[in-house]
Amino acid sequence: MGYTIAEKILMRHSGRKSINPGEFIQADVDVALANDITAPLAISEFKKSGFAKVFNKNKIVLVPDHFAPAKDLKSANQCKVLADFAKEQGIKNYFEVGCMGIEHALLPEKGIVLPGDLVIGADSHTCTYGALGAYATGMGSTDLARAYIDGKCWLKVPASVKFIFKGKLKKWVSGKDLILYTIGKIGVDGALYKAMEFCGPVIRRLDMDGRFSMCNMAIEAGARAGLIEPDEKTRKYVSAFKRRPKFYRSDKDARYEEVYEWDISRLEPQVACPHLPSNVKPVSGLKGVRIDQAVIGSCTNGRISDLRIAAALLKGKKVAKGVKLIVFPATQKIYLQAVKEGLAEIFVKAGGIFSTPTCGPCLGGHMGILADGETAIATTNRNFLGRMGSPKSFVYLSNPAVAAASALTGRITHPEKIKK
Amino acid sequence: MIIKGRVHKFSDDINTDDIIAAKYLVSTDAGELGAHCMETIKPVFSKDVKPGDIIVAGNNFGCGSSREHAPLAIKGCGVAAVIAKSFAAIFFRNAINIGLPFLESDDADKIRHGDIVEIDLDTGLINNLTQGKQYHTQAFPSFLQQIVECGGLINYIKKHKKDRSQ
């Protein structure tokens, strides 16, 4: 009997010869990640436990990114907890402001996460790394504290669900649209406790940035993980890193609880309307939705190809009067690349701002909170009530092209409507 | 363990931003977090709730982020247990790991706001004293029960480490 990629990775990390969905396992983790919101709780639980030293300082990653650069005194104190713990324990994968980036863009970029790894992160979007063919899943702070003690985590083996994408993507349609479409079809609990596996010719043609965007939002369908089988693109992406990856493929006779197959040749850019990521409509179905803010960035869409797409639309133009355009690249490397390529200049000349990497605007933390009655189009991953600020504000989720086009017109707009 | 309390009813897909908004995540104190529990969707909740009360909700309770602050806020405002038709996976494990009692029940729909219910965590029985009805739920798998019995994940690990070294 065959196994899926997810099952193979979990088998290897739990030392088992067979595995079944629904079973509880204790597994060894390769990477244990936490940020400035979740690490302080993990560190205090670890300290209370009476253990003095972490199990392996090289497997622990600390990234102050949510309220960093510190937005206020309380946030500063939370960030400092991470810095102090890293120093005390000799943790080298601590990323201070200046080296820091949004965790889920930063870890793959640095080669900290590789194909075949088991990654746990006290952040729900840890599932992003499934794009590399790793089993990566979000957990809580206490899970992290436990991993600090013995390097393990408990897991219930998820059943796998396969999504096959056939056809050819139209212009302006991206990995973000595929995942929004998927969540729209199956709902915010459509893959509850499942591992989603994305495959088919469309996925094979998708670049790594697009794959990260897709896997990033697996959690928005309730999934424990979102995975893509590694291929030549994956190999190339990880080829420069020192640690050796392990490439897993799903067996032909692997068990899937469900298989979805969609031809997406006619798919147009998708928009998730307030207040759930599953409330998805094609962009042309939204007529005259006025926006006050356009947000381009985040762990979903803050990578260099996202910024290039947005800049190509914004070049030589001005955002609509009264629209606030906030662009935030995901890492320092992407930031510098955007500066070198002249993208930063395009955003600023268009009347936008170009921010340092931070999760700030996405979760209503800082750097662009929405006021009462305001509406934003955002390339982020959640549009829950009050997510980006006021409980009386509205968030629409889209790809970077739709967000940039909408910034220019002041209304949610299909990018094909923007003249060169 | 028996828990008895007044029911506060919530809908499907209650997310972690509803339970505790991100702006309050600058604290890890359960009491401080509890003061803002459900503030976005029900501003009066934290004032209305009494120690020992019970939250009853629909599907996918606790969806969204991994913030353990969500079950902490629920505990911090005095809620003794949560009953829902289903729980989001990360919330589920966070609740186990910090020892917030909860039950999954298809009958959650039948329970009304303000009902007085009694929960037996050992048997999984929900007794609706107001309506005079009983609902049976599945008790947790033994592995999860052991964590709860140890008083949370860290105590469970400490116990196991000790057992192995003896």
Image: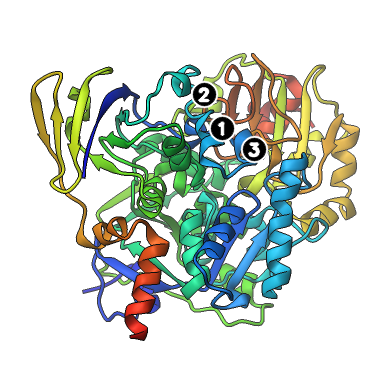
Pointer 1 chain: B
The CA span between labels 3 and 1 is: 12 Å
- Vertical order, A315 against B131 (above or below): below
Q: Is residue A218 above or below residue A24?
A: above
Which mark is on residue B39? Answer: 2
| In the foreground, A367 or B121 | B121
Are the residues flagged by discs 1 and 2 in contact, CB closer than 8 Å?
yes
Residue annotated with mark 3: A362
Between marks 3 and 2 in the image, the one whose residue lies nearer the viewer: 2
Residue B21: image tag: 1
State whether residue B81 appears in this view.
yes
Q: Residues at marks 3 and 1, common chain?
A: no
How packed mark 3 is, by other alpha carbons closer than 10 Å (few <14, some 14-19, many 20 or more), is many
Q: Amino acid at mark 1?
A: Ala
Residue A92 placement (x, y as % from top left): 71, 73
Q: Return the x and y of residue A346 as percentages of the image width and height.
A: 87, 39
Q: Is residue A294 left or right of residue B4?
A: right
The quadrant of the picture occupied by the N terminus of chain A is bottom left
Q: Is residue A330 visible?
A: no
